[in-house]
Structures are given as structure tokens and as C-alpha cells.
Image: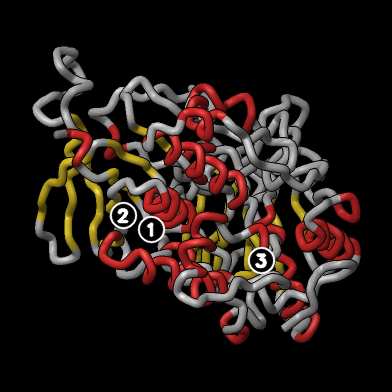
Amino acid sequence: MVNELPVIVVGAGPQGLAAAAHLVEHDVPVLVLEAGRSAASAVAEWGHVRLFSEWPELIDAAAARLLAATGWTAPTTGYPTGRQWIDAYLAPLAEALGDRVRVGARVTGISRRGRDRLVDSGRAEQPFTVHVESADGTEYRLDARAVIDASGTWATPNPAGADGLPALGERDQPELLGYRIPDFHHRADFEGTHTVVVGSGHSAVTAVIALARIARRNPETTITWVLRRGSIGNTFGGGDADELPARGALGITAKELVDGGLINLVTGFRIEQVLPDGDRAVVIAEDGRSLPAADRVVVLTGFRPDLSFLSELRIELDPTLQAPARIAAEVDPNIHSCGSVAATSALDLAQPESDFYIVGAKSYGRAPTFLALTGYEQVRSVAAALAGDHEAARRKELALPETGVCGGAGLFDASGASLGGSCCAIPEQVLQVGRAPAQV
């Protein structure tokens, strides 16, 4: 009877939708629960940002086969923005999946029917019970034979505080602090102002490049780029050596802008306080240094997984990265770049709680080395395992572009501790150099 229940996928983002496509291909009933009002709602929040992966690296194979039956044609060239990724691929995929995708359905808890975390007896024979809150606040429960958590990390950005906790005063000024790459199409919001950008990953690099272009047109615009690390290190990335050219172009451009004086780069600055100064904010480091009052502070220090709704499940996570323990060494940004991360299969992702898997960006915990292709390989393997095709589940079918660094990887002073970052994207308004796509 349990096997007749659907597999529930948490999150209708790129990996969640791809997981559903693979399960459909295996004739396994599936239901995708999405907290947002539409599929790929998290991607929609950064729809103005251009990815540094080309179209072939952003489309899952099973999803493409499902869509082909509808007359859909796959984009083959170019670097889409988040919005274009939705319009040309993710939204059509959600539509093709039909009522297998339920939006406005926020998962608030997952457990075993009639069994809390402590109970051993009959645990594996019980279906999962998934607690859901609808958009109107109504609560209900669904049973599932298996659960795939593809909820991502977008909703839980890291704070500005250097100790991983919010800096003193950080929570008190939500109107001045933001945790997303701003939409720089609204240029007037930044012209003639001082913006502090905190972070060392690709998202932070993206933001400072866009701000520097505004400063070129309006010299009264100032940008302070804050790094926690004591030296620049590999902040500027792999450059021409990066096999994702658009990603390499980020670092090349950022270095030119810093060298040209358009960006004030501050290193070894570990934020302890964010204090109000009229309608501005003053950022203060642990060593007492302070920055000139800022009109806004953009915190781009990476993301972390939301584990709150998994409290009644038996899961094994790496104590440092909060990633599934078996893959932690393979995604550690102290060791690996995006390109050198090995493919991870259902066997690697399996948890003590049988038939429960964490996939996608959330499976990498706090590591910023995630790429869409690695997530697609994960869900292919997990779907095969749940369908009983264990040979297919064991296969690893993935080749990634190599690069010397990935967002956030690198030395923290001399300790080797990594910084949070993001394997993210280039905003469409940023001028790109070298082999990167042209400005739109």
C-alpha cells in the first residue's frame, strides 16, 4: 500500500521539476510542492540576473524529453537570465507536469506516520507524512512513499556578521540591508549614493561590477567592497582559465575596476555591528574600524540550508558544511571548485531515514560549489533508485567544466577556512569581456 503513494518533491525549482520529470519517465507517481505562487518562484526573485552557464548546461535530459512531446524546442545557445530560464524552460516544464505541481504549498514538517524521531518499531514500513500550509494558511497533511527535498537555500541567506550570526543591529535596519543581488535596472536608486557590498563570491562580484558601471556615469556614486579574508587571494576567480567563460569574465572585470579606483576594496573586515546614522548605516568591524555611512548594505555572503522542517527525520549531515555526510568531502570549497566536484548519486545522498533524499543546492549545505548539471545528475540517480533501477542509479553520467576556483572558495587569512559565496550569475546589464556573451 505504501508503494502506491506518490513520491513527494519539496520545491518546484530546476532540480525539483527535473526530479519530477525523471519520476514520470519511470512511471512513478509524483507530487511537487512549491511554497511560492508559481513554479521556480525563487529563480523569479533573481530574474534580472544572467547565469554564467549556457543553455545546454541548464536543461535536464528527462525534462527535455518530456517537453519535446509538447512541441517545445530547446534553446541551444546563449546565457539566459533567470527570467529567460523560467520563460523558455522552467515554466513550460511545470505546465507539462500539470497537476503534479502544486503551488502555494509550503512544507512545514516531514515525519513518519505515527512515528517521531525516537521510534524504531515499524518505522521503515510507515509512509512519510508531510505537513503543508497553503497560501491561505490552511494546514493539511499528505502521505508519501518517499520524499525528495529540493527546496534549495535561497530563503536562508547568511548574515553579515563575521561569526555566522547577525551582526549587532543588523536585524534592526531591514530597509537598509538587502541579501539579494539588486536589480540595477533601477539605476536611480544607486546613483550618487554609497553602497557597501559584503561577500567574496560570484554574487558579490556581480554586484560590485554593476555598481561600478553606475559610478562611471555618476562620479558621486561610491562603492565599498568588504572582504572578511585578510588578502585578496582568489577573489577575482579563474579568469581566462575558467572553462565557464562568463564566470571567468566576472573576476577579470572586477579586478580592472578595483585597479581603476572605481571600487574601494577593504580586506580583513569582519563585521560586528551595523549601527544607524540617521537614514544611513555605519558598518563596524571587530577590530573597531568603521566604514563611511552607507545608503545601503548589500550582504552577499552565501546561503545555508533550512533544516527546521526536517527535525523529526533521521538525517546525517556533515558538521561543518551541513551537507549529507557522504558527499561533504566532494563538495568542500576548501578542496574543490565547481568543476572538480564529483558527481553524486542516490547511494551518496541516501540518509539513515530510508527513501528520503536531499538534492540540489541544499544537498551542498553551505558550500557554494553547486551547478545545475550536478543537481540534474543527482535527481536522475535518485529517481532511478526509487523506481528500482539500481544499475542506472549507480551510474554516474556527468562531466563538468573545470576551473581554478568557485564562488567563496579560498583561504580565510592563513587558516584555510572557506567563505560563503555563490556559483551564481552575471546581471544582464553588466559589460562582459573576453569570451563572455555580449551586453543586452
Answer left or right for 318 relative to 287: left
Q: Quadrant of the C terminus?
A: bottom right
In the image, 84 versus 59, the foreground residue is: 59
Q: Residues within 10 Å of mark 1 (few under 14, many from 20)?
A: many
Instruction: Pick whichever of labels 3 and 1 is earlier in the sequence.
Output: 1
Q: Are marks 1 and 2 in contact (CB under 8 Å)?
A: yes
Amino acid at the residue labelled 1: Ala
- For the residues marked 3 and 1, what is the alpha-carbon distance in whole angstroms? 19 Å
Answer left or right for 107 relative to 351: left
Image x and y of residue 386, in percent: 37, 35
In the image, 135 versus 24, the foreground residue is: 24
Image x and y of residue 396, in percent: 62, 34
Residue 55: image tag: 3
The reply to whether residue 229 is in sight is: no
The reply to whether residue 248 is in sight is: yes
Instruction: Pick whichever of labels 1 and 2 is earlier in the sequence.
Output: 1
- Snapshot quadrant of residue 245: bottom right
Colour mapping used in the image: secondary structure
Q: Residues within 10 Å of mark 2 (few under 14, many from 20)?
A: many
- Snapshot quadrant of residue 34: bottom left
Residue 32: image tag: 2
Residue 35: image tag: none
Amino acid at the residue labelled 2: Val
Q: In the image as oriented, which residue stretches furthest toward the top?
A: 121
Q: Disc 1 marks which residue? A: 12
- For the residues marked 2 and 3, what is the alpha-carbon distance in whole angstroms? 24 Å
Give the residue at x 17% y 38%. Answer: 129
- For the residues marked 1 and 2, what is the alpha-carbon distance in whole angstroms? 6 Å
